[in-house]
Amino acid sequence: MAKFNGGMGGANMQNLMKQAQKMQEEMQATEKLLDEWEIVGTAGGEAVVVYMNAKKIIDGIEIDKSVIDPEDEEMLEDLIMAAILDGYKKADAVYQEKMGKFGNAGGMGGLL
């Protein structure tokens, strides 16, 4: 009767698992870095400033009083949206730079 040796070979499978674990640890560290990374979105020459992390979680907004006009709410709303979109664009760039090296590893059905 033939003996089964485990297909890929024990050493290769063990090495693959070590690499997967290392990648998972690197991804977790990078995720934490993204949580702590400060992104600043601006609009109107910094009349509106939005603070967020690289995962697009907004944690602050500053509005210069000079752009607050009770007669023109729409302009202020537009400035706020523009600052948020500027921050999102910057956050996307940081996220892609930091997480892009992992490719689709985060979506491997929970393997990593």
Image (cartoon, rainbow, N blue to C red):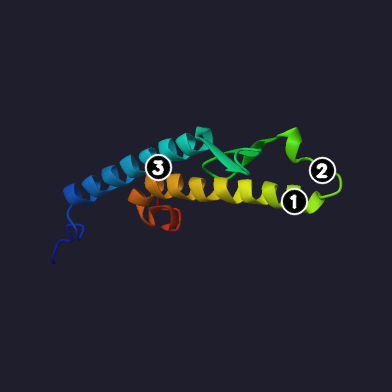
In the displayed structure, would residue 47 be above or below residue 100?
above
Q: Position of residue 26 (x, y in %)?
A: 36, 39
Mark pair 2, 3: CA separation: 45 Å
Do residues under tags 2 and 1 come within 8 Å of each other at their CB atoms?
A: yes
Q: Position of residue 17 (x, y in %)?
A: 29, 47
The residue beneath circle 2 is 69
Kind of residue indicated by mark 2: Asp
In the displayed structure, would residue 4 be above or below residue 72?
below
Sooner in the amino-acid sequence: mark 2 or mark 1: 2
At 63% from the left edge and 44% from the top edge, which residue is drawn?
Answer: 44
For numbered disc 3, what is the local secondary structure? helix
In the rendered structure, the answer to whether residue 53 lies left or right of residue 33 reads: right
The residue beneath circle 3 is 27
Kind of residue indicated by mark 3: Met
Sooner in the amino-acid sequence: mark 3 or mark 1: 3
At 59% from the left edge and 51% from the top edge, which residue is drawn?
Answer: 85
Mark pair 2, 1: CA separation: 8 Å
The residue beneath circle 1 is 75
Q: Position of residue 35 (x, y in %)?
A: 53, 37
